[in-house]
């Protein structure tokens, strides 16, 4: 095995798995309402609690979103 092939095989170990579109979990979030709510509270949207964010997530919740995010990393 030459050096190029070895480097290629090593790079495959660090490659994320392919996600097929039908496997994607579609999450719907009302971002405009979330941002408006955060502005009213005087904070950045990222500073809102998960419970507050859940009000604007239409078909899921923050716990599920965090789990999906961890699967992709």
Image (cartoon, rainbow, N blue to C red):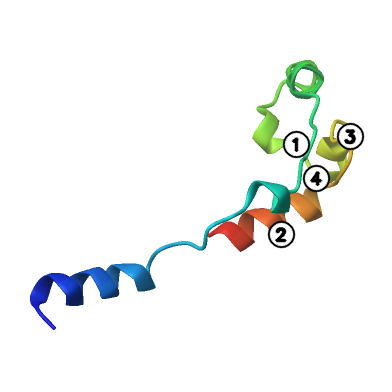
Residue depicted at x 69% and y 56%? 68
Cα distance, mark 3 to mark 2? 17 Å
Mark 1 vs mark 3: in front: 3
The Cα atoms of the two marked residues, 4 and 2, are separated by: 13 Å
Which badge, 3 or 2, is on the more N-terminal residue? Answer: 3
Which residue sits furthest left? 2
Choose top left, top right, bottom left or bottom right for residue 71: bottom right
Closer to us: 26 or 69: 26
Residue 32: percent from left, percent from top: 76, 17
Residue 25: give x, y in percent of width and height. 75, 48
Evaluate if marks 1 and 2 touch, with contact meaning CB atoms under 8 Å apart. Answer: no
| CB contact under 8 Å: marks 4 and 2 | no
Kindly report the distance in space between the C-alpha atoms of the residues bearing marks 3 and 4: 14 Å
Q: Which residue is mark 2?
A: 67
Residue 48 is tagged as: 1
Q: Residue at x 53, y 60 (%)?
A: 73
Labelled pair 3, 2 in contact (Cβ < 8 Å):
no
Residue 6, image x and y in percent?
A: 19, 77
Which residue in the protein does label 4 denote?
50
Q: Residue at x 71, y 53 (%)?
A: 23
Residue of label 3: 58
- Mark 1 to mark 2: distance in Å? 18 Å
């Amino acid at each position: 095995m030459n050096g190029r092939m070895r480097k290629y095989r090593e790079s495959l170990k660090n490659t994320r798995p392919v996600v097929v579109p039908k496997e994607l979990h579609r999450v719907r979030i009302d971002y405009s309402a979330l941002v408006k709510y955060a502005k009213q509270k005087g904070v950045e949207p990222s500073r809102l609690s998960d419970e507050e964010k859940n009000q604007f997530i239409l078909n899921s919740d923050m716990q599920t979103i965090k789990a999906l995010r961890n699967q992709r990393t």
